[in-house]
């Protein structure tokens, strides 16, 4: 099958081979990690026994990654729909990945089909045996309706059935989406990719969307969380039994709060009235993304209050957000509780748009990666990095303001992608609030005729590195803010 330019560029990071051969080369990545196998019972969040650490892979509903195994692609044809099951044995995490894809029948015009990504709840697997309850069974009305509308459907496993948005699950999910796009991307309208998450899958989806929000990622035009779990630490505090989360995350939230925070869309306090921690909401990165949060009056009161807390926080941003708490027809925590046809109607009307750089935005990064328009390189791994930005045009020069950088060694961006007019010059200002200014890498510009910095009274020549790839590197340490001031200011003249 043909590759889209998007998928080829993204997948070249995994292997310089396209198509089915690229799937095969995934097996040559890092060897699988070995997990401890001490004989210990594993319980779900309600206290039900699901297995033991003597057989942890099957207990959690996944398989260990295997460097030597070949990937498999199984295709089942039925009237009107093609069902594709892909297994990726080596993902770079401890867990192999599986996903289902449902392809509408008949030819699809290029770049025309919306994509619906379904995120399963705790204990569910898209590929369960026929005798078990699977996402495919529980969400079948959604799948059928989406297919009837000419949409493609993707259901990732995320490593295993109890992933709770763990970083390994995010990595596996990203790989599922990349491989799917390698196989079917020519049919997909990348401006109309929609996420629907149930229960655990709602939180997993929101963490996935928030921490994969670079302009080169396959991003979501709209998100629907059906009784989702926005905070993994809050879920831990409300659980009747913690063992499954202790195993997945290597301990409690107090043991390693960072890994719980980066698996959440926001941290919700376990103390009533469950306020949001304003220092850790990854949903900051979703500012401007339409989000519909939904909970049923039969759902646990604590989770309904937490959902309201997150909703109120999102309402404080620019995100066009909605929350509904309906009377459900059945007292069950279920895929089918929402009016799913209305959900698809709502999603279908949404189209992806990039954040408006002329409006102030904030980024919360958990690693070296692209967030919004910027690739961030951390000073210290294992904690969050922060950055706010805003573009001011023609005052008299375009000026990009990077405010309150935290735990950042370097900030990279494309001048044209941000919308900077580089003729005749533009300015970059870093309001560092007393911390060392990060280096700034500006790409997609020609060699400047001059680079200057403001020393508090005049513009003086500033050191910079001219990159062969097209761009310049501004040395933060070599261009300190003027004494007694909080900002570093450069002027680049083309």
Image (cartoon, grey):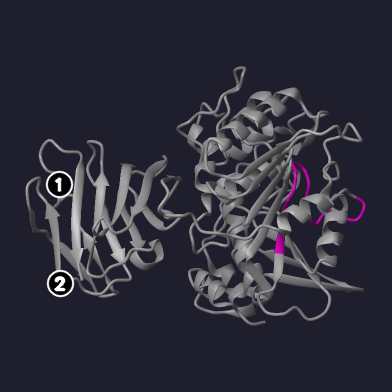
Vertically, is 171 above or below 108? above
Q: CA distance from mark 2 to mark 1?
A: 22 Å
Q: Which residues are magenta?
A: 115-131
Q: Nearer the viewer, residue 243 or 424?
A: 424
Asked whether residue 286 appears in the rendered view, the answer is yes
Please give the residue where the numbered disc 1 appears in the rendered image.
480
Q: How many marks?
A: 2
Q: Quadrant of the C terminus?
A: bottom left
Crowdedness near tag 1: few (<14), some (14–19) or many (≥20) residues, C-alpha within 10 Å: many
Which SS type dominates the magenta stretch? Answer: loop
Residue at the spot x=65%, y=69% of the render?
189
**Residue 313 image offset from top left, x and y in percent:** 56, 33
Q: Is residue 15 above or below residue 328?
A: below
Q: Name the N-terminal-most of marks 2 and 1.
A: 2
- Residue at (36%, 50%) from the top-left corner? 390
Q: Is residue 70 visible?
A: no
Badge 2 vs badge 1, beta-carbon distance below 8 Å: no
Residue drawn 68% across the image and 35% down it = 244
Tell me if residue 117 is in the magenta stretch.
yes
Q: Secondary structure at mark 1?
A: loop
Estimate the x, y position of residue 207 in percent, counting from the top left: 58, 45
Q: Which mark's residue is nearer the viewer, 2 or 1?
A: 2
Please state if 227 lies on the left or on the right of 88 as rendered.
right
Question: Which one is in front, 124 or 432?
Answer: 432
Q: According to the image, label 2 marks what residue?
A: 449
Q: Left or right: where does residue 372 sit relative to residue 270?
A: left
């Amino acid at each position: 099958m043909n590759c889209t330019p998007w998928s080829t560029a993204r997948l070249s990071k995994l292997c310089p081979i396209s198509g089915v051969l690229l799937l095969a080369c995934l097996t040559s990545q890092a060897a699988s990690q070995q997990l401890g196998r001490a004989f210990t019972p594993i319980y779900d969040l309600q206290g039900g026994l699901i297995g033991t650490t003597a057989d942890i892979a099957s207990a959690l509903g996944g398989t260990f990654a295997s460097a030597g195994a070949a990937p498999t692609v199984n295709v089942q044809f039925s009237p009107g729909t093609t069902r594709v099951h892909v297994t990726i044995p080596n993902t770079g995490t401890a867990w192999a990945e599986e996903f289902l894809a449902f392809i509408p029948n008949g030819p699809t015009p290029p770049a025309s089909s919306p994509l619906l990504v379904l995120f399963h709840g705790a204990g569910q697997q898209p590929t369960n045996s026929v005798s078990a309850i699977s996402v495919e069974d529980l969400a079948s009305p959604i799948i059928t309706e989406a297919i009837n509308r000419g949409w493609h459907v993707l259901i990732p496993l995320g490593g295993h059935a109890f992933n709770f948005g763990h970083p390994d699950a995010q990595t596996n999910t990203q790989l599922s989406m990349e491989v799917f796009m390698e196989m079917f991307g020519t049919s997909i309208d990348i401006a109309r990719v929609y996420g629907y998450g149930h229960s655990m899958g709602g939180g997993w989806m929101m963490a996935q969307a928030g921490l994969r929000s670079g302009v080169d990622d396959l991003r979501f035009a709209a998100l629907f969380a059906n009784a989702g779990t926005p905070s993994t630490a809050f879920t831990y505090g409300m659980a009747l039994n913690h063992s499954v989360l202790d195993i997945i995350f290597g301990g409690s939230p107090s043991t390693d709060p960072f890994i719980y925070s980066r698996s959440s869309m926001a941290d919700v306090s376990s103390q009533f009235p469950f306020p949001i921690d304003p220092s850790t909401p990854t949903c900051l990165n979703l500012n401007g993304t339409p989000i519909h949060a939904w909970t049923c009056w039969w759902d646990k009161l604590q989770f309904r209050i937490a959902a309201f807390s997150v909703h109120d926080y999102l309402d404080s941003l620019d995100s066009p957000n909605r929350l509904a708490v309906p009377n459900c027809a059945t007292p069950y925590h279920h895929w089918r509780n929402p009016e799913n046809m209305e959900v698809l109607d709502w999603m279908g009307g949404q189209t992806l748009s990039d954040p408006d750089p002329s409006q102030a935005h904030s980024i919360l990064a958990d690693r070296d990666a692209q967030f919004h328009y910027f690739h961030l390189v951390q000073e210290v791994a294992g904690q969050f990095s922060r950055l706010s930005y805003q573009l001011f045009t023609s005052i008299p020069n375009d000026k990009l303001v990077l405010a309150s950088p935290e735990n950042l060694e370097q900030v990279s961006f494309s001048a044209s992608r941000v919308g900077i007019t580089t003729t005749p010059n533009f300015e970059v200002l870093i309001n560092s609030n007393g911390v060392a200014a990060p280096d700034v890498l500006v790409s997609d510009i020609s060699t400047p005729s001059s680079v200057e910095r403001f020393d508090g009274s005049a513009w003086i020549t500033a050191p910079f590195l001219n990159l062969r790839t097209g761009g310049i590197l501004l040395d933060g340490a070599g261009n300190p803010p003027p004494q007694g001031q909080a900002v570093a200011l450069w002027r680049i003249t083309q």
